[in-house]
Image: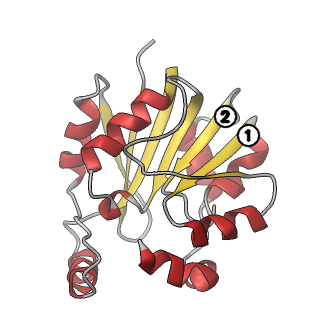
Amino acid sequence: MRYFDFLAPVYDWFMPSADPDMWIDLLRLPADGSLIDIGGGTGRVGAELRPLVRSVVISDISTGMLKGALRKGALQAVAADAARMPFQDGAFSRAIMADALHHFSDQEGAVREMFRLLAPGGRLVIEEFDRRRLPVKALALGEKALFMGSRFLTPSQICRMVEACGASASVRKGPYFSVWIVADKPN
């Protein structure tokens, strides 16, 4: 994750801003409770959603990225591995992961943690690049050449991980080359 500590000071300049309307729709916001943004980096998504929930926690393993999140104000930042989060079961009503799953070495563990952290009836949304798209295949090769250890999954592979947690998942096509995986934790 040293790549992200290095990129942190300029990350928000070259990453497109979040589409808050899409996130609001998919997450069914506003919502009572708190939101966790796992692998949330500088908080580019979580900061946009802050007014619509009780609180937002940005979790990332890169302390450089978390410093960027704290500069946005009104966000809490926690340095943690996505597969081993320091929160109680059911602590959040919403969980998001934006363009981050492909960076995690334990992808299945990260998805399980998202579900563990969700309160019953809570909703998670994972936005990820669609591996089936040619530009994403090029991105995957580039990240491999940089020894980033990224592993891009298909939407159906991500859905199977979510379904292994006991929820049904749906896929929505996102902007550009992204897909959105949406699931609710059963009551």
For disc 2, the marked residue is: 34
Identify the residue at image location x=63%, y=83%.
Answer: 9
Residue 13 in view of the camera: no
Question: The residue tagged with tag 1: helix, strand or loop?
Answer: strand
Rounded to the nearest angstrom, the CA distance separating label 2 from label 1 is 5 Å
Q: Amino acid at mark 2?
A: Ser
Q: Position of residue 91 (x, y in %)?
A: 58, 27
Q: How far across and down, in percent of the image, does residue 42 sit?
A: 62, 67
**Residue with the mark numbered 1:** 55
Residue 171, image quadrant: top left
- Quadrant assignment, res 130: bottom left
Q: Residue at x 23, y 83 (%)?
A: 138
Q: Can see residue 135?
A: yes
The kind of residue on which mark 1 rests is Ser
In the image shown, does 93 or 144 lie closer to the viewer? 144
Residue at screen point 41% across, 71% down: 1
Q: Residues within 10 Å of mark 2 (few under 14, many from 20)?
A: some
Does the residue at mark 2 contact the one at mark 1 (Cβ under 8 Å)? yes
Looking at the image, which is closer to me, 160 or 56?
56
- The numbered mark, 2 or 1, whose residue comes first in the sequence reads 2
Mark 2 residue element: strand
